[in-house]
Image (cartoon, helix red, strand yellow):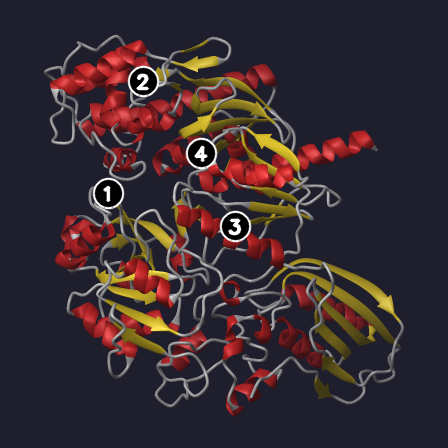
């Protein structure tokens, strides 16, 4: 039968006994739907002997309670202090209403409110109660791959509209059986109004098939586990889309996956059954372990153990790096797979490299048919496409690297005027996200990826349409990057043509503004934005910027020395080009490959060296634009030290340089002073590079030189900020941009700034890379709109 939301009465007798009765209405805003909030309220009311009602609306949970004032006060306190683990209360308002002499507490049917919205819970990993049921032979859901309750399971990925009721999710296709319906209707049951509630008799099913659609006999999960043990590549349908799985210990299987996915070296994530299993090949501290077991279940970047533990994981999982991304099972299906395989699994995004992940069964077979040997499918539809989130712990604090499943769509609280018009920001071209900002809440969309791909543009379109609908937003202001040719800018132009107010935000200002937004900062701040590329107001490529800015505008007060990029964007892949450019800028280029040049099959021959050298010498042309990019500085140093002449994926050379530098004990190397002069201040990075080359040629170990580079750059930033602080009187510093995802650089720069009595703020809730740009754009746009509104008034 089909079960819809109905009133549930819980008779308790009189709510008061000789105590003067009051009735209060509490309106609760936040993440309070789909998290067991109504049964929690019912239990709380029963505990405190209160009568009344609770109702879901599309904008809030509305509670009316009646009883003695003392009990009402205790109820109000417990409402916030004891709220369910997946809930997040942003605001509670209370008004007194007329008593009704009620004797019962009643759970009312959900109702929609025109134009109202509220935050929605992200998907949550399987809770411990459900895991116990999953492996309990006596339980009716024993080994059922879709067990869930109000404390866990799919949420945002199955929601089509609000309020959050089964009829508005992809679970509407499954009619609950009698026992499931009884659980759903019982306020005392942890599955009360659990919209994905199901069991083997009435819910989704899983099966294994090959690319031709031939279904394996028997249990699909067991068949998938057997295929994995035999070395096959299996596409697994997860919460927000497909993942590609192989045995992480099987070097041959991992290499086949890389070959078929066209991903030669980019690190692959690993899934283990529990934290202890991951300790076999990774160092895990308490904060990292806490992130791993959180309900978000992100991929956590961990330090690898030494070579003695290498046998636990194939060498080709994360070649050349000292970190490995590890996650724990997020669904019952994953728990069952890991339980059957009893070994770590590579679990990487189900896509062809740089495209969005597949989410539908047919789509997966078509797009992944040339990669996967078999497909572990199920018939619960995924509505919202979400990749796995990635985090890193730096100095004991979690920093989001990729924000998607488990984190989205939770809003970031931002200091803006609640009367400001809703803002849509369309983000950067690379690592794209969008952001909807309204009522002081910034809804940053999921990781979309690079907008060079038509599939990414379609993904952005579908995700944005979902957010605008669920959060009932018609943006009055639309923000975009200054770059005229970004796909995100072209999308913004369509909104502007339809009447939305236009705002353009410089890329690096948006980076710093994203830090200000998530820390709720206003007023002037010094910003250091280090990344690969961003369109500068002077038409050149920026990427090593020191800004004095606020939420409205910025002033460029410093930058790395401008150096040409011979070949333009090719320098991001071929770091040896930047090595030549930096040698020329330092006056060290000999016109041919020098005798000391570190060998490598991926470097240039003498003919290409001379050709690129001539292009670099011309400088300032379309073929060799001028750049202050910090990312290209890292590429140059990695090449000059022989760490990597090429980047096989974004920032791979820089990541290997960081890994090498971390092999030196902290504090074991001294920084090279970096000359700073001019207005704006220019940091003489070519001179720094010249000294690094001199040290390497003198025989200093390459790891030590790599550590010197990191220490010197951190020291240069700290010194520059201290000087600017003394001139401007601004003692707050924000660090952002993809280069500050380098944990060593971030930690050292932050420590040196604090030693100079400067306050340091960094991205945590959103990525420091371009995935956080949309938040910064939205914050600036909302601030400018508020200023214009105040002028008009």
Q: In this view, does 698 lie above or below 194?
A: above
Q: Are marks 2 and 4 in contact (CB under 8 Å)?
A: no
* Residue 583 as seen in the image, left or right of residue 465: left
Q: What residue sits 54% from the left and 80% below the top?
A: 191
The secondary element bearing badge 4 is classed as loop
- Mark 2 and mark 3 lie on one chain; the one further toward the N terminus is 3
Residue 737 numbered mark, or none: 4
Q: Are marks 2 and 3 in contact (CB under 8 Å)?
A: no
Q: Distance between the residues labelled 2 and 1?
A: 26 Å
Q: Which of the two marks, 3 or 4, is nearer to us in this view?
A: 3
Q: Quadrant of residue 560?
A: top left
Label 3, residues with CA under 10 Å away: few <14, some 14-19, many ≥20: many
Q: In this view, does 646 lie above or below 424?
A: above
Residue 565 in view (yes/no)? yes
* Residue 363 as seen in the image, left or right of residue 85: left
Per the image, the residue denoted by label 2 is 672
Q: In this view, does 600 lie above or below 397?
A: above
Q: Position of residue 459 (x, y in %)?
A: 46, 52
- Mark 2 and mark 4 lie on one chain; the one further toward the N terminus is 2
Quick one: 375 or 684, which is closer to the camera? 375
Per the image, the residue denoted by label 3 is 445
Label 2, residues with CA under 10 Å away: few <14, some 14-19, many ≥20: some
Residue 321 numbered mark, or none: 1
Q: Which of the two marks, 3 or 1, is nearer to us in this view?
A: 3
Q: How far apart are marks 4 and 1 (CA)?
A: 21 Å
Label 1, residues with CA under 10 Å away: few <14, some 14-19, many ≥20: some
Count of marks placed on residues: 4
The secondary element bearing badge 3 is classed as loop
């Amino acid at each position: 039968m089909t079960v819809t939301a109905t009133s549930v009465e819980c008779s308790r007798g009189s709510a008061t006994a000789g105590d003067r009765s009051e009735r209060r209405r509490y309106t609760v805003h936040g993440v309070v739907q789909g998290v067991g909030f109504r049964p929690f309220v019912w239990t709380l009311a029963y505990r405190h002997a209160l009568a009344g009602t609770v109702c879901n609306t599309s904008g809030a949970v509305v509670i009316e309670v009646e009883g003695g004032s003392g009990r009402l006060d205790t109820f109000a306190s417990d409402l916030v202090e004891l709220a369910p683990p997946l809930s997040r209360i942003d605001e509670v308002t209370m008004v007194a209403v007329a008593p009704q002499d009620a004797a019962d507490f009643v759970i009312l049917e959900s109702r929609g409110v025109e134009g109202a919205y509220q935050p929605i819970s992200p998907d949550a990993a399987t809770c411990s109660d459900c895991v116990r049921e999953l492996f309990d032979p006596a339980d009716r859901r024993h080994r059922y791959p879709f067990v869930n309750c109000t404390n866990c399971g799919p949420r945002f990925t199955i929601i089509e509209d609000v309020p959050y009721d089964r009829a508005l999710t992809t679970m509407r296709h499954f009619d609950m059986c009698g026992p499931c319906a009884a659980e759903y209707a019982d306020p005392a049951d942890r599955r009360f109004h659990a919209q994905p509630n199901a069991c083997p008799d009435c819910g989704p099913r899983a099966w294994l098939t090959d690319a031709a659609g031939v279904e394996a006999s028997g249990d699909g999960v067991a068949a998938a586990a057997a295929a994995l043990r035999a070395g096959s590549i299996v596409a697994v349908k997860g919460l927000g889309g497909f993942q590609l799985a192989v045995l992480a210990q099987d070097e041959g299987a991992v290499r086949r996956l890389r070959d078929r996915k066209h991903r030669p070296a980019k690190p692959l994530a690993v899934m283990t059954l529990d934290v202890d299993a991951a300790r076999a090949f990774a160092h895990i501290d308490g904060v990292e372990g806490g992130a791993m077991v959180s309900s978000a279940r992100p991929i956590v970047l961990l330090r690898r153990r030494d070579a003695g533990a290498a046998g636990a994981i194939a060498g080709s999982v994360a070649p050349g790096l000292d970190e490995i991304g590890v996650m724990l099972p997020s669904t019952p299906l994953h728990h069952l797979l890991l339980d059957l395989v009893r070994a770590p699994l590579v679990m990487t995004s189900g896509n062809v490299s740089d495209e969005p992940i597949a989410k539908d069964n047919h789509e997966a077979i078509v797009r992944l048919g040339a990669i996967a040997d078999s497909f572990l499918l199920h018939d619960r539809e995924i509505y919202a496409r979400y990749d796995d989130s990635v985090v890193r712990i730096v100095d004991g604090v979690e920093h989001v690297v990729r924000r998607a499943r488990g984190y989205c769509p939770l809003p970031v609280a931002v200091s803006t005027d609640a009367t400001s018009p809703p803002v849509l920001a369309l983000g950067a071209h690379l690592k794209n996200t969008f952001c909807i900002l309204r009522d002081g809440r910034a809804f940053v969309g999921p990781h979309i990826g690079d907008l060079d791909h038509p599939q990414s543009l379609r993904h952005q379109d579908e995700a944005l349409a979902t957010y605008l609908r669920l959060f009932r937003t018609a943006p009055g202001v639309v923000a975009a990057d200054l770059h005229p040719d970004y796909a995100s800018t072209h999308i913004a132009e369509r909104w502007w043509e339809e009447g939305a107010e236009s705002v353009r935000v410089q890329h690096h200002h948006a980076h710093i503004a994203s830090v200000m937004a998530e820390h709720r900062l206003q007023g002037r701040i010094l910003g250091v934005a280090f990344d690969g590329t961003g369109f500068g107001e002077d038409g050149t490529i920026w990427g090593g910027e020191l800004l004095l800015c606020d939420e409205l505008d910025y002033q460029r007060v410093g930058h790395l020395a401008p150096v040409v990029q011979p070949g333009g964007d090719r320098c991001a892949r071929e770091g040896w080009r930047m090595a030549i450019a930096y040698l020329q800028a330092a006056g060290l280029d000999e016109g041919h490959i020098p005798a000391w040049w570190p060998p490598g099959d991926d470097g240039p021959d003498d003919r290409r060296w001379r050709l690129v050298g001539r292009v670099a010498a011309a400088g300032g042309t379309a073929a060799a634009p001028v750049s202050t990019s910090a990312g290209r500085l890292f590429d140059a140093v990695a090449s000059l030290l022989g760490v990597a002449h090429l980047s096989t994926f974004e920032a791979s050379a820089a990541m290997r340089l960081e890994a090498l530098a971390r092999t030196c004990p902290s504090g074991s190397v001294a920084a090279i002073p970096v000359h700073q002069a001019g207005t704006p201040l220019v940091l003489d990075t070519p001179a720094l590079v010249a000294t690094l080359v001199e040290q390497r040629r003198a025989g200093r170990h390459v790891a030590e030189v790599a550590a010197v580079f990191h220490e010197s750059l951190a020291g240069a930033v700290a010194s520059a900020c201290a000087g600017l602080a003394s001139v401007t009187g601004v003692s707050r510093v924000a660090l952002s941009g993809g280069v500050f995802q380098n944990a060593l650089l971030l930690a050292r720069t932050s420590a040196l700034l604090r030693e100079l009595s400067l306050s340091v703020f960094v991205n945590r809730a959103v990525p420091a890379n371009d995935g956080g740009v949309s938040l910064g754009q939205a914050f600036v746009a909302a601030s400018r709109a508020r200023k214009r509104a105040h002028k008009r008034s």
